[in-house]
Amino acid sequence: QVQLVESGGGLVQAGGSLRLSCVASGRSLSNNVMGWYRQAPGKQRELVATITSVRTTNYADSVKGRFTISRDNAKNAVSLQMSSLKPEDTAVYYCNAVVLSGGRFTNVWGQGTQVTVSS
């Protein structure tokens, strides 16, 4: 069973930077799409960025040019480097992996890490 554990959240001033990390256990995810999502209070969870097994990336328009997603298959990990942070980036950030289980693609989620950007 795949488990995802995030780290690196915290409180930062607007314009600052944070790096989120997510380590997977249970199986290798080197061939899986992984990504980051976020959920602000009172809002739906939204995609932040994804990365494929061949490192093709996709970003939400709101974070393009400020966030960078990367992966380290040797460590079974994915990271999100966040720069030029804005108060509207405040949210719980979730690591995600899409895995094939029982013949179906299933989303696996981490427990989430809080990112708070003060103005």
Image: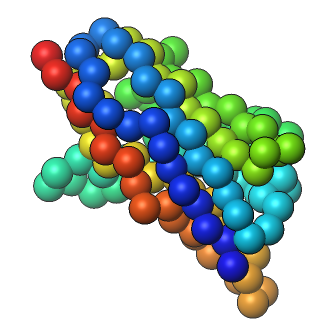
Write the residue at 78% across / 45% down: 75
Residue nearer the viewer, 106 or 114: 114
Q: How is the image coloured?
A: rainbow
Quadrant the C terminus occupies:
top left
Q: Is residue 117 above or below residue 106?
A: above
Left of 77 or right of it: where is 48? left
Q: Is residue 104 above or below residue 9?
A: below
Q: Position of residue 13 (x, y in %)?
A: 23, 16
Viewer can see residue 111: yes
**Figure quadrant of residue 2:** bottom right
- The residue under the point 26% across, 28% down is 11
Does 117 sit left or right of 69 as displayed?
left
The picture places residue 36, in percent across and down from the top left corner, at 51, 46
Q: Closest to the observer: 48 or 115?
A: 115
> Is residue 58 visible from the viewing direction of this image?
no
Give the x, y percent position of residue 82.
46, 23
39 sits to left or right of 53? left
Q: Quadrant of the N terminus?
A: bottom right
Does residue 52 appear left or right of residue 84 in this picture? right
User: Looking at this rendering, what residue extends furthest in the bottom direction?
Assistant: 102
Q: Is residue 109 above or below residue 93?
A: below
Residue sitting at x 58%, y 60%: 4
Residue sitting at 51 percent across and 15 percent down? Answer: 65
Number of numbered callouts drawn: 0
